[in-house]
Amino acid sequence: MPTYHIEMFEGRTHEQKKKLVAEITRVSVEVLGGSAESVNIIITDVKRDNWASGGRLWSEPRN
């Protein structure tokens, strides 16, 4: 079964992450078959200082 790697800005609550992994697991089992126990999800919280798009750090003000 799949292993999902999710990178997102830090700041989500435990409850938000819990709901996210439950839904990803549910859909994976629904679409791919198999058991929920075989779905792996790794969440990496990233500080805005460590993520950039378009040559600008996300910690910098945006227009």
Image (cartoon, rainbow, N blue to C red):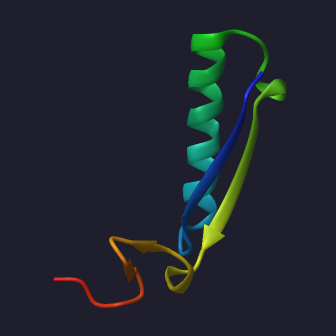
Quadrant position of residue 2:
top right
Q: Quadrant of the C terminus?
A: bottom left
The residue at the point 50 percent across, 74 percent down is: 51
Residue name at image x 57 percent, y 67 percent: 13
User: How many numbered badges does the structure rendering display?
Assistant: 0
Q: Quadrant of residue 12?
A: bottom right
When the figure is inspected, residue 63 is found, relative to residue 30, above or below; the finding is below
Q: Is residue 9 left or right of residue 54?
A: right
Residue 21, position in %: x, y? 64, 43
Query: Residue 19: horizontal and vertical position, in percent?
Result: 57, 46
- Image height of 37 relative to 4, above or below: above
To which quarter of the image does residue 44 belong?
bottom right
**Where is 43 relative to 47, above or below?**
above
Give x and y (percent) for residue 8: 54, 62
Q: Is residue 13 left or right of residue 58?
A: right
- What residue is drawn where x is 76% and y is 30%? 39
Q: Quadrant of the N terminus?
A: top right
Q: Residue lying furthest front in this view?
A: 55
